[in-house]
Amino acid sequence: MTSHNALLERVRKLLAKAEAEGVTPAEAQALTAKAAELMAKYGINRALLAAERPETDRPADRVVDIGNPWARVQAHLLCGLASAMRCQCVVLPRTDPGSRIHVFGFASDIERADILHTSLLVQMWQGLAAAELPSWSRSPRAWRRSWLLGFATAVVSRVRAAEHNAAAEATAPAAASGSKTTLVLADRRQVIRRNIEHAYPL
């Protein structure tokens, strides 16, 4: 098992603990935050490796169909996570209920977003089921939607902070490959932008 795979396996174990029954919301949040921190470092490492060995991490895309319930909230969570992890999303029209998202990025970043999105959906549904509807709420559906959006916004903010911190540390002047990392991340953004423009020309 490579060091990259070992790190990703550690992330999976942390997320599995966060999803386990009996884990408190605070414990799940702490476990997920640690997983996001490791995931962010993994993303930087994969980007640097691909700069030397392009075959290890190529540009990719994936169409994700999201069904109800709460398809728009699920899509909001996915797009937020994908954006934080240096991917970009295009929301596609869909004739039947639900949402369709076209995710563009490098394969490792799409994989990172998918792993975290899958785990956070489990945590989100568990949290909603455990949340007590306030007696003052006149619309249970509106309150639940507000709770779900609050959950999604909070976790995306934490993941974005972890990604920002990892990138800032890796691109700092004192970092061994700081200037190289800056160029690598900028180049990957341009590649993704070109791929979206090619798939959806104006």
Image: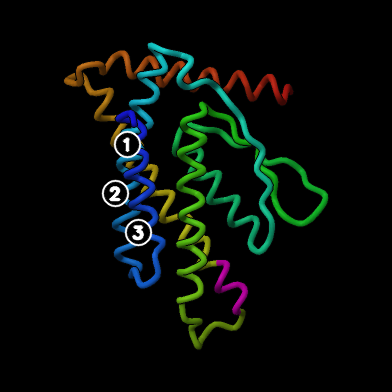
**How far across and down, in percent of the image, does residue 48 sit?**
35, 19
151 and 127: which is toward the camera:
127
Amino acid bearing label 3: Lys
Above or below residue 77? Residue 148 is below
Residue of label 3: 17
Quarter of the view holding residue 145: bottom right
Going by the picture, which residue comes out furthest to the bottom? 135
Residue of label 2: 34
Above or below residue 96? Residue 199 is above
- Gap in Å between the C-alphas at discs 1 and 2? 15 Å
Amino acid bearing label 1: Ala
The earlier-in-sequence mark between 1 and 3 is 1
Q: Residue at x 33, y 70 (%)?
A: 24
Q: Residue at x 35, y 59 (%)?
A: 17
Range drawn in magenta = 140-145
**How far across and down, in percent of the image, does residue 66 sit?**
66, 51
The earlier-in-sequence mark between 3 and 2 is 3
Q: Residue at x 30, y 30 (%)?
A: 3
Residue of label 1: 6
Q: Are marks 3 and 2 in contact (CB under 8 Å)?
A: no
Can you tell which of label 1 and label 3 is closer to the viewer? 1
